[in-house]
Image (tube, rainbow, N blue to C red):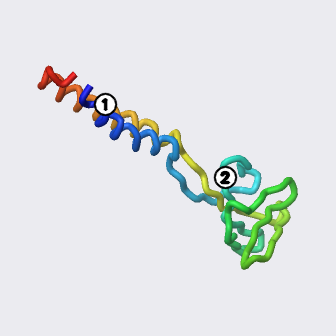
Amino acid sequence: MRYRRTIAIVLLPLTLAQLTGCTHKVWVGPEKIHPEGEYVHGVQTTSGEQVIFDKPKLAKRGNTSIAGRVDDKLLRFPVQDVQWVRVQRSDALATAPIMIVFALAVGAVIAGSCFMNPGCI
């Protein structure tokens, strides 16, 4: 029972890392935006102009347009005029194997130390 606090201290960061996952920004076609869980950081038009939005959490993708603010001015781009959209994605599943291996290694170390010291439980 002495190791409950140690186990909790080790598992808390693992749980937080698993819940938050890894995030990265990628350029995708406008049809490949997932409205839930993705923030639109900017667009590149078919004419080659790149526009990065000031507040990605407030940028919206509708059925016909993508809108965001630049210098406190609302800009709206028709979807047919947008070649690429810069979005932030989260890959929680990509970190799962690493977290599982780390948790098993920590568990093995704790179990080994209890094996070496039978009075620890």
Q: Residues within 10 Å of mark 1 (few under 14, many from 20)?
A: few
| Disc 1 to disc 2, C-alpha distance | 37 Å
Q: Is residue 9 above or below residue 108?
A: below
Residue type marked 1:
Arg
Secondary structure at badge 1 equals helix
Residue 54 position within the rendered picture, expressed as x and y whole percent measured from the top left: 67, 71
Secondary structure at badge 2 equals loop
The mark lying in front, picked from 1 and 2, is 1
Q: State the quadrant of the C terminus.
A: top left
Q: Is residue 103 above or below residue 39?
A: above
Q: Is residue 71 above or below residue 108?
A: below
Residue 52 lies in quadrant: bottom right
Residue 12 position within the rendered picture, expressed as x and y whole percent measured from the top left: 40, 40
For disc 1, the marked residue is: 4
Nearer-the-camera pick, 54 or 97: 54
Q: Residues within 10 Å of mark 2 (few under 14, many from 20)?
A: some
Residue plotted at (77% across, 74% down): 47
Q: State the quadrant of the N terminus.
A: top left
Residue plotted at (79% across, 65% down): 67
Residue 38: which numbered mark, if any? 2
Residue 33 position within the rendered picture, expressed as x and y whole percent measured from the top left: 72, 51
Residue at the right extreme of this rendering: 64
Residue 47: which numbered mark, if any? none
In the picture, measured across the screen, residue 65 lies left or right of residue 69, that is right
Residue at the left extreme of this rendering: 116
In the picture, measured across the screen, residue 91 lies left or right of residue 5, that is right
